[in-house]
Image (cartoon, rainbow, N blue to C red):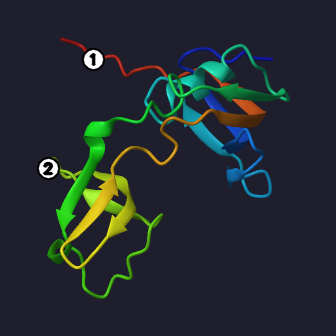
Amino acid sequence: MSMIERNSRVTLYYRIGLTDDQVLEDNFDDEPITVQLGCGEMAEGLELALIGLQEGDEQTIDIGPDLAFGYVDEALFRALPRVEFDPDLELEPGLIIEFATEDGDTLPGTILQFNEDEVRIDLNHPLAGQTVRYSVKIVAVAEAPEEPKTLH
């Protein structure tokens, strides 16, 4: 039976929530997912919690902001002109919408408050500053695929 290492491909069921037992995402009733560790698909702390586990193992661990989704960065609170938002979009505090970055990526932003002139948003990850409770059940472990060798 393979043990999970830093670059393993891992098939697993997972549940992510907060320490108050609020569940934010859960695939235990669906199909398991397969992730490649070390590729940035998961937060660092979530990956580290998997290392050393084997097929069939189950674990629940609390991961602090330093290894989960980071701390709240005050520089990521912004005020944007209301006219930049679709007039048909019903804004409400707590609403999370996608914002495009200059390099073409997207990131979630949470509406904090708004009026006719401006919309105050928080571009921190919605779980920034939170301790995350992470539960997993390991379905399968495979070694990282070999990088294709090229001849020079």
Is 75 drawn above or below residue 107 in the view shown? above
Q: Provide the secondary structure element on which disc 2 rests.
A: loop
Q: Is residue 137 left or right of residue 125?
A: right
Residue 8: name its quadrant. top right
Q: Residue 129, which numbered label?
A: none
Query: What's the residue at 48%, 63% (across, down)?
Result: 94
N-terminal-most mark, 1 or 2: 2
Q: Is residue 62 left or right of residue 65?
A: right
Residue 140: name its quadrant. top right
| Nearer mark to the viewer, of 1 and 2 | 2
Per the image, the residue denoted by label 2 is 102
Query: What's the residue at 30%, 88% (across, down)?
Result: 88
Is 38 drawn above or below residue 95 in the view shown? above
Q: Is residue 54 left or right of residue 45?
A: right
Per the image, the residue denoted by label 1 is 150
Q: CA distance from mark 1 to mark 2?
A: 35 Å
Residue closest to the eye, 77 or 135: 77
Amino acid bearing label 2: Glu
| Disc 2 crowd, CA 10 A, few/some/many (<14, 14-19, 20+) | few
